[in-house]
Amino acid sequence: MPKLSPTQPGWLRSYYFTRAIFSVAWVAAAILFSTQSHLVILLLVIYPAWDALANLVDARVNGGLKANPSQAFNVAVSAIMTIAVIVTVSTSMFAVLAAFGVWAIFSGVLQLYTGVRRWRHYGAQWPMILSGAQSALAGAFMISRSIGTVVPTILDIAPYAAFGAFYFLLSAIWLVVAASRKAAA
């Protein structure tokens, strides 16, 4: 982890709030447009593309991709997932859900690792660590649902995004509280 500047904890709070807002908006759009296939396809492509972009920007702000190998790998995994969704969405929603499951496992493990690495410098990373672990478990659940008989929809993915929003928001709030306590001390 690179040497910290005074703006990095503020960046992380803003980053977590931004990730939470995006995820809440995505879940709302998924619910509102769940029956409109063209918008569903767009939402399914946007979600991993946004994750790739967010991880890329965060890694660059925090010393670059070389200094943040878990995020560099997450950028690659999310970019591959974006392509996988584009390819599988024309095949079946079963394939899309399976792809999201595999992605959730990889990105969850990478998020967990990033949270552990950041703990020492920023503190307040336990929500990100829990989120990473839960993401991996959700991925396994999505994969198990993808081999079922009920055709999946975007609403099978929305809870995953909603929990992500919750954890990003919790992390941001925790960092705000920690900064307030530090300022008061």
Image (cartoon, rainbow, N blue to C red):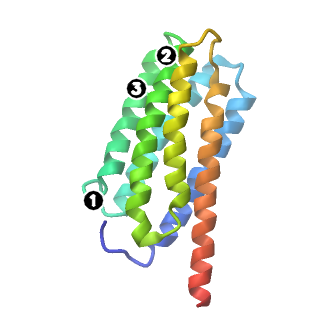
Q: Which residue is mark 1?
A: 67
Tell me, yes or no, whether the two marked residues, 1 and 2, touch with CB atoms within 8 Å. Answer: no
Q: Residues within 10 Å of mark 1 (few under 14, many from 20)?
A: some
Residue type of the residue flagged with mark 2: Ala
Residue at the outermost bottom position: 185
Q: Earlier in the sequence, mark 2 or mark 3?
A: 3
Q: CA distance from mark 1 to mark 2?
A: 34 Å
Which residue is more in the foreground, 150 or 19? 150
- Left or right: 28 in relation to 45: right
Element carrying mark 2: helix
Residue type of the residue flagged with mark 1: Ala
Question: In the rendered view of the protein, which quadrant contains the N terminus?
Answer: bottom left
Q: Quadrant of residue 169?
A: bottom right
Q: Which residue is mark 2?
A: 95
Element carrying mark 1: loop
The residue located at (59%, 12%) in the rendering is: 148
Which residue is more in the foreground, 96 or 127? 127
Tell me, yes or no, whether the two marked residues, 2 and 3, touch with CB atoms within 8 Å. Answer: no
Residue type of the residue flagged with mark 3: Ile
Is residue 132 visible in this depiction of the protein? Answer: yes
Spot occupied by residue 18 in the image (x, y as percentages of width and height): 58, 55
The residue located at (49%, 64%) in the rendering is: 12
| Image disc number at residue 83 | 3
